[in-house]
Amino acid sequence: MFVKFDANAQEKQRKAKNTPTRIRSDIIDIKQKSKKIDFLGNVVVERDDASLLSNKMEVFYVDKVSDKSEIKNNSNIKEIKAFGDVKMFNDEFVASSDLANFYPNKNIFILEKNVIVNNGTSILTGDKFIYDLKTKKGNFVGQKNRDNLKKDDKKSGDDRVTITIGDDIKEQKKYFKK
């Protein structure tokens, strides 16, 4: 469903390796000893055609001088953790969750807890969504063990990934033609 044929995919993959990661927020708190930067308030991360928004993000980085072996794809960011009202946007879909991790050197986003993905015609929900910027593919993972769930989660019903499939685009156009 999220797979899209693209004749220029190899060119996009090559560019993705060299694309910088941009981060903006209201407040920035840099902690050099722990190699961590806290971004607070209206945080936006942009990479290629994807954007990640949240209330708070923690960025863990490597020092270019002392940790050269850990730097890949010209990025010294190891991981970005997002908390609270997380939203992800790209050309293929819009997603929301409670938590997210982004690994710039691997070009992978992981959204967790209360994940909802909307691609325009279908809505998917699940516990965990992994999206690869290179391949433009995403995978949902459901909750594996109901015994480990909280009482409230057990009461809420099914623990599997769900999908609501909408009308075909051509069918939708028929309804809106005048």
Image: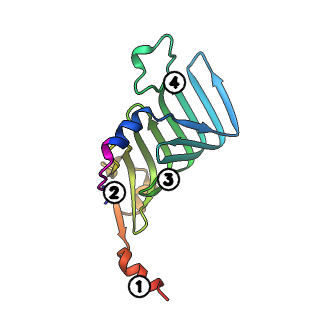
Image position, residue 153 (x, y; %): 43, 56
Callout 3: SS: strand
Q: Residue at x 35, y 40 (%)?
A: 13
Asked if labels 1 and 3 touch by Cβ distance under 8 angstroms, the answer is: no
Vertical arrangement, residue 173 with respect to residue 106, above or below = below
Residue at disc 1, secondary structure: helix
Q: Tell me the distance, in whole angstroms, between the alpha carbons under discs 4 and 3.
A: 24 Å
Secondary structure of the residue carrying numbered label 2: loop
The residue carrying mark 1 is 174
Was residue 7 drawn as part of the magenta stretch in this picture?
yes
Residue range in magenta is 4-10
Residue ID for mark 4: 61
Q: Earlier in the sequence, mark 4 or mark 1?
A: 4
**Residue 10 horizontal side relative to residue 58, left or right:** left
Picture quarter containing residue 41? top right
Task: Please say whether residue 167 is visible from this viewpoint.
Answer: no
* Label 4–label 1 contact, CB within 8 A: no
Three-letter code for the amino acid on which mark 4 is drawn: Tyr
How far apart marks 4 and 1 lie (CA) works out to 51 Å
Question: How many residues crowd mark 1 within 10 Å: few (<14), some (14–19), many (20+)?
Answer: few
Amino acid type, residue under disc 1 in the picture:
Lys
Q: Which mark is residue 89?
A: 3
Q: Are marks 2 and 1 in contact (CB under 8 Å)?
A: no
Residue 120 point in image, percent of width and height: 43, 66
Judging depth in this view, the residue of 35 and 134 nearest the camera is: 134
State the CA–CA distance, disc 2 to disc 1: 24 Å
Q: Secondary structure at mark 4?
A: strand
**Residue, x 58% and y 46% (percent of image)?**
54
Which disc number belongs to residue 2? 2
